[in-house]
Amino acid sequence: MARKRKELPEIEKVEITGIAAEGKSLSRIKLKDTDETPIVVFIPFGAPGDIVDIKLDKKKHSYAEAHITKLLKSSPIRIKPRCDYFGVCGGCKWQHIPYEDQLNFKRQQVEDALIRIGKIEVPEIPMTIGSKNIWGYRNKMEYTFSNKRWKSWEEIRGEVPGSEETNALGFHIPGSFDKVLQINKCYLQESIGDRIRNSIYEFANKNNYSFYDIKGNKGLLRTLMIRPTISGELMVCLTFGEEDKDKMNQLMSYLIKEFPEISTLVYVVNLKMNDSISDQEVKIFSGTGFIEEKMGDLKFRISAKSFYQTNSLQAQELYNKAAEFAGLLEEKVDKPLVYDLYTGAGTIANYIARNASKVIGIEYVEDAIEDAKENSSINGITNTEFYAGDMKDVLTQDFIETHGRPDVMIVDPPRAGMHEDVVKVILNAAPQTIVYVSCNPATQARDLALMESKYTVTKVQPVDMFPHTHHVENVVKLERRV
């Protein structure tokens, strides 16, 4: 017979004192009067200065996790969240915190990762560069169709009015992969996104379209992607979980008629268990199959599978800072040879190419390399070369001898950071300057520690790409030790 789990306690009048990783707030409390030292309790959706009652959800030896059951006294910095779905959909967890304070907390997050945890010697870290737009900034939103709409306990118990509708088009609920929250208004993208999404939802329900059954892997309507650009173009990508050509064509014809703003409409028929379309054929219903985004005087072609920074205006701030740290903002007589690792669609590589003698881009994803080459071509850039493959396999001594030892190396890895073998390859290449762009300061700190014997961190700059979330990009400049 299984042992009954011990019920964890509720604790009253807890003061929230800080912000922790993953956007949670924290408090340090003694769970018992006999405890000698307090433990850290991580609490979502709190603000420093709040006085709250909490319920423990998990208890470990050195920390605990809890949720707020009652807000007794609001923090002086707490503000009213703009979105009706705050605290439910899982996104924008810092809406209740003023933007200036968000920037300060993100700077603190970088400092904690690099100095306190990573033990890296760094110069003074400046304030996070804020985003010009803190709402409507996303150029890509992805939504899920589901025949299982998420309902709150209050709705299930009849304490609040509910809807008989079981279909939903919106976001997955954290911790519940098969339930989707119906979204009517999202402030992360311009209003065209809401209008298109809501119109599809109404059309599909009116015409008895089947919404995807995530557990059963069946249903016609599966996912929706909406990608607007600051230059005014708009892509819509529909993914279908079954192939019903008549209904598919009816829906897409309706969209083109109803929304002349759509520059290109593409679709995918995905019959496999996961939602990724990276290995699926993207078919064109209307338009060219791609859109173009502007950055400075450059154009970047974006397809349904393309990676592009999701905050277009702030991406230029990020790349300007990377170019500044690399010494590539202005043209020099002796132009450096640059290697751009994890180049993706070659955005950084093409952005800095004019002030480099040559840029060598390396990326694991072959489709992204084709995008990078295309982006060089449409901008008339002739001093870039791109190679696809595993970084440690491509960037060999033979490769360096063939293409030249880099003066500058720019690395922009995924959240997991760099494999230790890749770090060894970089140290072997021994560029004078390394610019490390990271979306995860924790893994960045780990990688910097591996390079500390041969490189010194000389500059650090956090950049906010995602207002109202805890995520922060961080740019670090390293110089080779003499």
Image (spheres, helix red, strand yellow):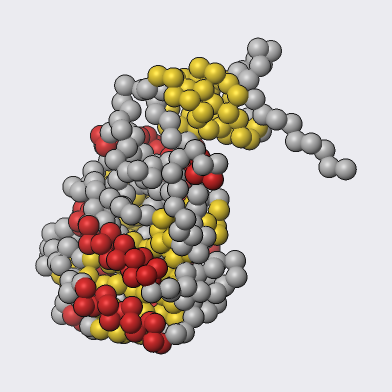
Q: What residue lies at 32% left-to-right and 37% top-to-bottom?
A: 81
- Say if 421 sits above or below 2 in the image: below
The residue at the far top in this view is: 33
Q: Quadrant of the N terminus?
A: top right
- Say if 21 sits above or below 268 in the image: above
The residue at the far bottom in this view is: 245
Q: What residue lies at 20% left-to-right and 48% top-to-bottom?
A: 133
For the residue pair 29 and 323, the one nearer the viewer reads as 29
- Residue 397 seen in the current view: no
Q: What residue lies at 17% left-to-right and 71% top-to-bottom?
A: 261
The residue at the far right in this view is: 1
**Residue 401: image location, x then y, percent:** 39, 76
- The image shows a total of numbered marks equal to 0
Relative to 228, 442 lies left or right: right
For the residue pair 87 and 479, the one nearer the viewer reads as 87
- Say if 371 sits above or below 353 in the image: below
For the residue pair 342 and 134, the one nearer the viewer reads as 134
**Residue 349: image location, x then y, percent:** 27, 68
Quadrant of residue 56 within the rendered picture: top right
**Residue 163: image location, x then y, percent:** 44, 52
Relative to 445, 380 lies left or right: left
**Residue 432: image location, x then y, percent:** 32, 57
- Residue 136 seen in the current view: yes
For the residue pair 163 and 279, the one nearer the viewer reads as 163
Q: What residue lies at 28% left-to-right and 50% top-to-bottom?
A: 187
